[in-house]
Amino acid sequence: MSGKLVNVEAGRGIASVLVVLYHANLFYFATPKYWSGEALGGAFAFGRAGVEFFFVLSGYIMMVVHRRDLGQPAKIGPFLQKRFVRIYPFFWLVLAVTVALYALNPGSGQAMYRDPLNILQSALLAGREPLHAVVFVSWSMWHEILFYGLFAVMIGAPRIGVPLFALWIAACAVIGWGGVPTPWPNYFTRFVNVLFALGVLSALALERFRIPAARWLLAAGALIFLGAGVDVDLSHDAHESLSNALFGLGSAMALLGAVEAERGGRLKAPGWLVLLGGASYAIYLTHMLTLPILAKLARRFGLVDALPPWAGFVALTAAAVLAGVAVHLAVERPIVEGARRLFGGAPRRMPAGAAADNSPS
């Protein structure tokens, strides 16, 4: 079987929309400035779990796309170049716009968003504290960059890289779960990094085995994911690592079921959801720029008073998602294609089960 499986691409779209729902719920509802009342009872407070879904997908995609590169040091350069082209050029554009907006509105945001050192760390997607990133949602990409670095070691020297990756995952499981203080940046060993390994293991399992009862497994994974979401919604003091684990387990089960079901010709995501998957990186990076603009427009034109919270929530999130799709088509895709041509590369044909490119979460 050749080409990519569209269910994986669709999964990225679902993950990005979950994050948009989460931030719309968190920042624009239950506040007198906009809609005074949580839309849908705040049911999407668990939408942050889209990041956990992204991490599982990332581990899966990296292993599927680059499985044959392991043990080939010559492949490190192309791997890093591909990751750079896919992530940084468009991200730097979003960062530049964000920095400019903070400069034009001195009273907005925190002082650290104007600090040159913090801007530099934000641009590199590396440093001491990802939660201080100027493009706030890019905190998860700091974890992605760390994962890519370890994966590059596995490509060049698997006898060193594989044990090192396993040691890293074990450290994240033990230190992250226990919240043990460390002398290194906290995100290096946060429990959520374990979810990359769930994605890697999912790829290996799908490579070696046929997964029985695929659609039932997909449904069970979705139920675990949603059940963990209900727990987060109702218990705001829930153990973060436990919720990470449950979201990751549900994501991995759903991924296994979705891929196997499509391989067997029993399930295929609709085209509009696949389009959202292709636009997931743009949706993820831009929605925190578009949401405040859309919310202010809604207030200016009286929609805040005219629409009940649930309708305002649907309209606001849908508009932010559609704006992300438009940016993907008009801006992100040309930038990525131009960067590929600049570096002399061409789009690589993906093995079965891979998405065209992995969008960092």
Image: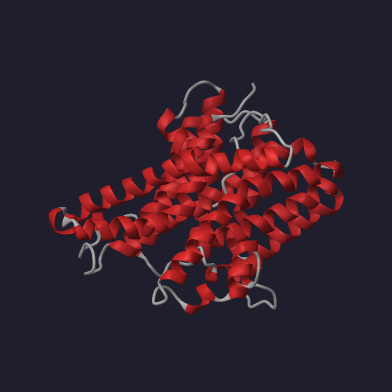
- Position of 349 with respect to 257 (left or right) is right
As displayed, is residue 101 above or below residue 326?
Answer: below
As displayed, is residue 108 above or below residue 229?
Answer: below
In the rendered image, is residue 263 in sight?
yes
Image coordinates of residue 197 in percent, x first then y, are 65, 50
- Position of 289 with respect to 198 (left or right) is left
Front one among 101 and 201: 101
Q: Which residue is drawn at 37% across and 66% down?
A: 235
Quarter the N terminus occupies: top right
The count of marks equals: 0
**Farthest residue in the front direction?**
104
- Position of 36 with respect to 206 (left or right) is left
Image coordinates of residue 210 in percent, x first then y, are 62, 28
Q: In which quarter of the image is residue 207?
A: top right
As displayed, is residue 238 above or below residue 286?
Answer: below
- Position of 277 with respect to 122 (left or right) is left
The image's colour scheme reads secondary structure
Front one among 39 and 307: 307
Front one among 16 and 198: 16
Image coordinates of residue 320 in percent, x first then y, are 36, 49
Q: Which residue is drawn at 66% across and 46% down?
A: 85
Q: Residue at x 84, y 47 (%)?
A: 156
In the rendered image, is residue 230 in sight?
no
Image coordinates of residue 312 in percent, x first then y, are 23, 52
As displayed, is residue 232 above or below residue 247?
Answer: below
